[in-house]
């Protein structure tokens, strides 16, 4: 999480300090990808935990 916060902060800093459209677009896309990955990781962790605690699996 620390690295994720740091990279998002750096991407935002670059985004804020440039007027180049291509660079701004790339920085925004990179931020969006990182945030989407975080959502998917959280979802998968929740799914794994739900599977582990499923009563159907207790008998195995």
Image: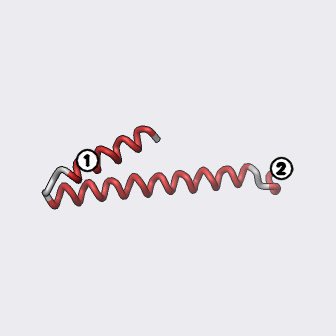
Residue at image point 28% right, 50% down = 12
Q: Residue 25: horizontal and vertical position, in percent?
A: 23, 60
The correct choice, above or below, for 29 with respect to 52 in the image is below
Q: Residue 16: horizontal and vertical position, in percent?
A: 22, 53
**Of the image marks 2 and 1, the number of the one nearer the N terminus:** 1
Q: Which residue is mark 1?
A: 13
Q: Is residue 6 left or right of residue 27?
A: right
Q: Secondary structure at mark 2?
A: loop
The answer to which image quadrant residue 24 occupies is bottom left
Looking at the image, which residue sits at the far top? 2
Q: Residues within 10 Å of mark 1 (few under 14, many from 20)?
A: few
Relative to the observer, which residue lies in front, 19 or 60?
Answer: 19
Residue at image point 41% right, 43% down = 4
The correct choice, above or below, for 4 with respect to 28 in the image is above
Q: Residue 44: horizontal and vertical position, in percent?
A: 58, 54
Q: Secondary structure at mark 1?
A: helix
Residue at image point 13% right, 57% down = 20
Residue at image point 24% right, 56% down = 26
Relative to the observer, which residue lies in front, 21 or 54?
Answer: 21
Relative to the observer, which residue lies in front, 41 or 4?
Answer: 4
The number of numbered discs placed on residues in the rendered structure image is 2
Q: Residues within 10 Å of mark 2 (few under 14, many from 20)?
A: few
Q: Which residue is mark 2?
A: 58
Looking at the image, which residue sits at the far left? 20
Q: CA distance from mark 2 to mark 1?
A: 49 Å
């Amino acid at each position: 999480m620390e690295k994720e916060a740091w990279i998002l902060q750096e991407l935002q800093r670059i985004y804020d300090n440039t007027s180049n459209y291509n660079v701004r677009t790339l920085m925004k896309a990179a931020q969006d990808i990182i945030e989407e990955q975080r959502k998917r990781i959280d979802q998968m962790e929740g799914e794994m935990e739900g599977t582990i605690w499923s009563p159907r699996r207790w008998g195995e």
